[in-house]
Image (cartoon, rainbow, N blue to C red):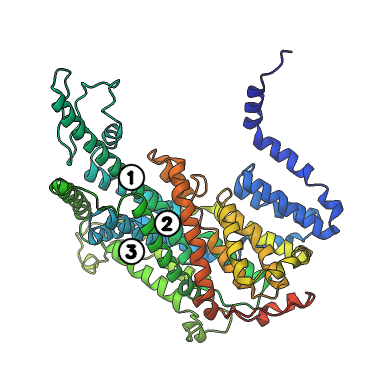
């Protein structure tokens, strides 16, 4: 046999990496079964195996999430009757109701009307347009999935950008240095709203060459500026979608995993529900969104006022054209249809009922029912059930009395077929896998075992620990799914808080929020991947912008949890609901936050 070229062999290894990980990971983790106490060791083996598969995507994420169903019972960690119910807890029903409501909004086109209306209000100046994009994307991603929001907003952004700056390929051509003597000097420049037509010839006087080069330089600078603004538009949409998803419990999966794992570890903790989370997370989202907008607009030229006065007329003309595009698209939608109005009404009822069920600072409507019987999941399912029978066309009494009226088919606001197509069932399985893993960690004693090894961290001031935890989670989630990240680390963080006698929510809330702050890489989140796939962004653009966004996010979370979050959730005291699990812990001085 001929010796194989090392480069070819490495390519073969890379091509078969998933199969190799599938086979080697279980073997490499086997020593854990012998060096860790028996039951804890078995659970740690399963947890790390799932973590490796999730991070490398050697198996589909949902398939990895189902591993506890076969491994926990067969390894004697947890019986099947305890594992399987974890896959459809009430938290999953709340998530499902949010997804079904989102599919109804998409089905009637209400999301597009909202987006265009916001853009009409903010205007077409680059900085304000970026702000409009970010406000719209963040608001929609509070209710729709972050991925769907990004996929819907990018075509709108591209249409506006083309009306502002012309064709993208022409813009890229104009960014090249046309004064290069080795380049083709006979190319006729494309005309953009803020350019002059320039034609070069070889037999022109020197002063003409200088004048021409000056014009070419102006064109190139303007094109570079426009390209920067274009990138700013594209990059702002996925970032705003990720930020907006943190504001509601149903906005992103990690928020629901926090609720589910709290119910598993601390059954008596009822502080986190839809209303209380919104009151905490919405101001945080607004602060981060404004800071993110200032950074993106500064970096990509939206706040730059260096344009010459002589170009004002041309720029104004381009902006008028962009405004006309938005107005025209909005006019095409026509008046609000009966289906749109109905879904808007039901959506408002959906949000209001979730907020007012048990807002904590006043009695909610849940006091009219047996205590502990009605949850956010019940509220969500009541509202989405209405979608499947409420008519999409305005019912007419005249039809009943008009014998000549034709029988039109009855169409509800949402069909089950559409709901089935829209709901990502893999994410629901992923949530279930997280809850099953948390249950295994609790019942096997693995959480307590890990906590015993985290005792040295008691010396770190809790406020500093929050920054470290958020930063670590934000970095880890750049390379792994945010859902998988929070599933892996929440049990560890909860046990760490118990060991250092800190309110568990003080560490768990920042970690949950921080795992949505994945801004640096195209592969970090699906929204980032969609924006990058447009072909106009480079990895270095996302790294440069995302690095500062991560720092801003970590600081904002730290501010929120140490100010209004501290008083909302009584984070400065160790709660009674966490004491039973802390009975065996070493005594540590309680945390007092100034």
Vertical side of 48 occupied by 451: above or below: below
Tag 1–tag 3 contact (CB < 8 Å): no
Q: In the rendered view of the protein, which quadrant contains the N terminus?
A: top right
Left or right: where 13 falls relative to 72: left
Vertical side of 474 occupied by 493: above or below: below
**Label disc, if present, on residue 228 of the rendered structure:** 1
Q: In the rendered view of the protein, which quadrant contains the C terminus?
A: bottom right
Identified at 23% across, 22% down, the residue is 185
Q: Position of residue 512 (x, y in %)?
A: 56, 63
Q: Position of residue 528 (x, y in %)?
A: 46, 48
- Determine the image quadrant of residue 203: top left
The residue wearing badge 3 is 391
Q: Position of residue 191 (x, y in %)?
A: 17, 34
**Mark toward the start of the polypeptide (1 vs 3):** 1
- Determine the image quadrant of residue 385: bottom left
Left or right: where 435 falls relative to 338: right
Can residue 122 be seen?
Answer: yes
């Amino acid at each position: 046999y001929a010796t194989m070229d090392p480069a070819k062999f490495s390519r073969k290894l890379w091509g078969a990496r998933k199969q190799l990980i599938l086979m080697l990971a279980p073997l490499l983790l086997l020593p854990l079964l012998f060096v860790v106490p028996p039951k804890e060791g078995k659970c740690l083996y399963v947890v790390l195996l799932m973590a490796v598969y999730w991070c490398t995507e050697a198996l589909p994420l949902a398939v990895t999430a189902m591993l506890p169903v076969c491994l926990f019972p067969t390894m004697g960690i947890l019986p099947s009757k305890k594992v399987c119910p974890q896959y459809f807890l009430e938290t999953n029903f709340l998530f499902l109701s949010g997804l079904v409501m989102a599919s109804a909004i998409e089905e009637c086109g209400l999301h597009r009307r909202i987006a265009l209306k916001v853009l009409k209000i903010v205007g077409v100046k680059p900085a304000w347009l970026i702000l409009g994009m970010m406000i719209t994307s963040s608001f929609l991603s509070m209710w729709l999935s972050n991925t769907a929001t990004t996929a819907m907003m990018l075509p709108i952004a591209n249409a506006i950008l083309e009306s502002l700056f012309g064709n993208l390929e022409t813009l890229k051509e104009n960014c090249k240095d046309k004064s290069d003597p080795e380049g083709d000097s006979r190319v006729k420049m494309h005309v953009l709203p803020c350019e002059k037509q320039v034609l070069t010839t070889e037999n022109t006087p020197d002063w003409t060459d200088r004048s021409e080069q000056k014009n070419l330089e102006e064109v190139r600078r303007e094109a570079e500026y426009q390209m920067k603004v274009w990138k700013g538009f594209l990059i702002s949409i996925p970032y705003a979608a990720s930020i907006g998803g943190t504001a509601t419990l149903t906005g992103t999966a990690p928020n629901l995993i926090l609720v589910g794992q709290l119910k598993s570890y601390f059954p008596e903790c009822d502080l986190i529900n839809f209303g209380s989370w919104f009151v905490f997370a919405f101001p945080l989202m607004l602060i981060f969104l404004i800071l993110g907008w200032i950074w993106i607009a500064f970096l990509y030229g939206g706040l730059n006022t260096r344009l010459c006065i002589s170009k004002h007329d041309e720029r104004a003309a381009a902006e008028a054209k962009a405004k006309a595009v938005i107005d025209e698209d909005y006019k095409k939608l026509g008046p609000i249809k009966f289906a749109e109005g109905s879904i808007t009404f039901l959506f408002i009822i959906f949000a209001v009922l979730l907020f007012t069920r048990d807002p904590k600072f006043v009695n909610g409507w849940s006091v009219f029912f047996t205590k502990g019987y009605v949850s956010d999941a019940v509220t969500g399912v009541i509202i989405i059930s209405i979608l499947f029978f409420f008519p999409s066309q305005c019912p007419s009494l005249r039809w009943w009395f008009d014998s000549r009226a034709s029988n039109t088919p009855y169409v509800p606001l949402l069909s089950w077929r559409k709901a089935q197509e829209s709901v990502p069932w893999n994410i629901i399985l992923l949530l279930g896998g997280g809850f099953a893993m948390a249950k295994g960690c609790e019942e096997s004693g693995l959480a307590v075992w890990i906590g015993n090894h985290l005792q040295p961290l008691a010396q770190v001031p809790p406020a500093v620990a929050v920054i470290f935890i958020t930063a670590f989670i934000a970095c880890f989630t750049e390379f792994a799914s945010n859902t998988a990240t929070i599933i892996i680390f929440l049990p560890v963080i909860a046990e760490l808080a118990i060991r250092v006698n800190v309110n568990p929510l003080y560490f768990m809330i920042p970690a949950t929020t921080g795992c949505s702050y994945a801004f640096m890489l195209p592969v970090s989140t699906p929204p980032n991947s969609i924006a990058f796939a447009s072909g106009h962004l480079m990895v270095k653009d996302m790294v440069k912008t995302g690095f500062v966004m991560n720092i801003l996010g970590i600081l904002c979370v730290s501010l929120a949890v140490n100010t209004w979050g501290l008083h909302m959730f009584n984070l400065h005291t160790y709660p009674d609901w966490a004491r039973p699990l802390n009975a065996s812990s070493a005594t540590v001085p309680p945390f007092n936050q100034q």
